[in-house]
Amino acid sequence: MWALTALLLLVQGSGQAATLEKPILSLHPPWTTIFKGERVTLRCDGYHPLLLELRPINTLWYLGHLLLPSHKKSIEVQTPGVYRCQTRGAPVSDPIHLSVSNDWLILQVPYAAVFEGEPLVMRCRGWYDKVVYKLHYYHDDQAVRYFHSSTNYTVLQARASDSGRYQCSGTMRIPVESAPMFSAKVVVTVQELFQTPVLRVMSPKEIRGTAHRRVVLRCETRLHPQKRDTPLQFAFYKYSRAVRRFDWGAEYTVPEPEVEELEAYWCEAATATRSVRKRSPWLQLPGLGSSLDLASTNTPAPKAAALAPGNKPFSFRKPPVARSVPSVTSVPNATSAGLQFPAGRVPTSGPPACAPPTPLEQSAGALKPNVDLLLREMQLLKDLLSRVVLELKEPQVLPEFKGTRETPTSHFPLSQGSHQMTPVES
């Protein structure tokens, strides 16, 4: 008796050894939709310390917010609703939603969460297991598979793109073959196994051993809480070349000659079977003043980092290909600060010469006088024509035009190079 009391005090003093995890609720058979009148079995499994096993463990069952009278580890149910269970000292389990249908055709999907890379199995079932003919499966209203008769539809390695609304259709012989019948739509969500990885540079405080003087990259991701024991492998790349193939380590030490090209690196995380692979974005380097300080690694800082101006981010990208560009020479005697001239064309002292007009400016200046002359000549021609028209209409207005035949008439030829009219006798 004293030994049992001491054991109880020991467990209470240590905070009950550890926090109990919520129990696992399972469904048998594993389909969330059944026909009316059918029964399924719910089972509640949880972890219990040895101390709690000394007494009978009660299991609490909930249908919605209603407490069910049963305290067994498993129960049979046929009522639709949301079921949960709870064991003594542990939180409530995850829910299972059970649907009961009175249709001729139902689409059954598994109750448990389906993760990336796992098989996704769906079952189109006729009323009380009647054979379904001309069976079609639909994903988001698009036909994805056809079977001659009752067959399960399986996605071998589910992806996030496989999430959506599923439905099936087919015919049954009751007793003759019926018209096509459709099941109700069922929502299927494929859970993310792990997040998209992120590549970052480890700080010197995080690096152990002699590698603290080197630049170390780390490929980080996070597994789903229900799959936190899934092992992952990591690979590292520079541009499209693999610098380290898949391995269990999530860290990679960059060789010193390649430190200046850190932004060319990215990583990839995958399961051991490669059923799920995800790549990270390109390495994003923080700006100056951040926690990353390459100078603190006691190694010469990259040239790009030493020349980084102001608060701009580091840039370790490869410089552009050199091209033939004339060198530039600074002229200290220039009147404007920062004025520069190509080598070999340095002006003499004194004010800078005016830049010569461009061909376009020259052509515009030459055309302007010609346009003005043309406008004046057109105005003179207009006046002359108006006088001729007036004479023809009203001869008395211009009597001077009725002179003898000896009266010379004047012609006014227009000179292109002069603005004056020169009378010419005929």
Image (spheres, rainbow, N blue to C red):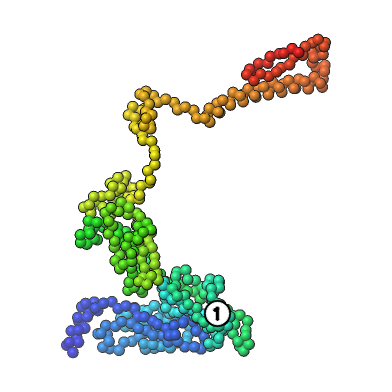
Mark 1 crowd level (few <14, some 14–19, many ≥20, 10 Å Cα): some
The answer to whether 345 appears left or right of 409 in the picture is left
The answer to whether 181 appears left or right of 320 in the picture is right
Give the structural element (helix, strand or loop) at label 1.
strand
Q: Residue furthest front?
A: 324
Q: Residue 414, can we see it?
A: yes
Q: Residue 103, can we see it?
A: no
Q: Amino acid at mark 1?
A: Phe
Q: Quadrant of the C terminus?
A: top right
Percent position of residue 21, x then y: 32, 78
Percent position of residue 159, x then y: 44, 70
Q: Is residue 177 above or below residue 233?
A: below
Q: Is residue 354 above or below residue 167?
A: above
Q: Nearer the viewer, residue 39 or 112?
A: 112
Q: Is residue 85 above or below residue 189?
A: below
The residue that appears at 81% across and 10% down in the rendered structure is: 406
Residue corresponding to mark 1: 147
Q: Is residue 406 above or below residue 212?
A: above
The residue that appears at 35% across and 47% down in the rendered structure is: 319
Q: Quadrant of the N terminus?
A: bottom left
Percent position of residue 31, x then y: 46, 82
The residue that appears at 38% across and 45% down in the rendered structure is: 321
The answer to whether 337 appears left or right of 253 in the picture is right
Percent position of residue 62, x then y: 40, 82
